[in-house]
Image: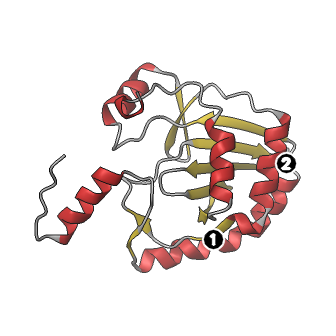
Amino acid sequence: MILVVLRFPAIILLAAACVGGCSKPSVVETTADVQEIADSFKLYRPFARAVQHASRAVLYEGLPHQNWERTTFTNELATKQTVFLCKHPFYSEPLSLSQEDTDTLRRLYCDSSSFNPFQGHKACGGYHPDYCLEWSNGTKQFLVQFCFGCHEMKTFSEGQEHYCEMSSTAFPKFESILKKYRGHRTKDAREL
């Protein structure tokens, strides 16, 4: 592959993102909104306490990446049954999550060392949740979305959003558990 380097930093950044994809996220934007997002970390502890006592866990698989796999994403959205959970599409049929993995995911989520405050937007084509884990405890629902491209996690509950980054030790654990549940998503040409 020949890479033409232009003198415009944005072009270089875009080229690097295209070549490297999202495998090594790097912060590309630090603006006032980053601090606002990072401040949502204060919601982590109350969310974790509630998830600790959740009686039900349901796992949904996300569609292909909306930018890197646009053709596959558009086709899946048009031909498969989907549900939008906090503005992101997922296959509507939940995946069967084992009790052992449910317990491990709960422990990981409730361990404060699993997450760090949001550091900034990444050059990975935009936040794209690969999975959504819905925890409920009777009256409250918590939607936990995992983006493996940017190593980020969002939790939504009662109009509040907690947006953070998975720690370097927790990320591979979340990824190894959840990726084995891939059940609906069509493989993209990059994976064949």
Residue 28, image x and y in percent?
A: 36, 70
Q: Relative to 7, is 132 above or below?
A: above
Callout in the foreground (2, 1):
1
Q: Is residue 50 visible?
A: yes
Q: Is residue 139 visible?
A: no
Quadrant position of residue 73 = top left
> Which numbered dot is residue 54?
2
- Residue pictured at 73% horizontal, 27% vertical: 96
Q: Is residue 49 left or right of residue 112?
A: right
Residue 94, image x and y in percent?
A: 67, 28
Q: Furthest residue to the top?
A: 79
Q: Mark 1 and mark 2 in contact (Cβ < 8 Å)?
A: no
Q: Number of callouts in the render?
A: 2
Residue 138, image x and y in percent?
A: 85, 44
Q: Relative to 167, is 185 above or below?
A: above
- Residue pictured at 44% horizontal, 27% vertical: 187
Nearest the eye: 163 or 64: 64
> Which numbered dot is residue 116?
1
Nearest the eye: 110 or 31: 110
- Residue pictured at 53% horizontal, 50% vertical: 148
Q: Is residue 185 left or right of residue 142?
A: left
Q: Relative to 31, is 62 above or below?
A: above
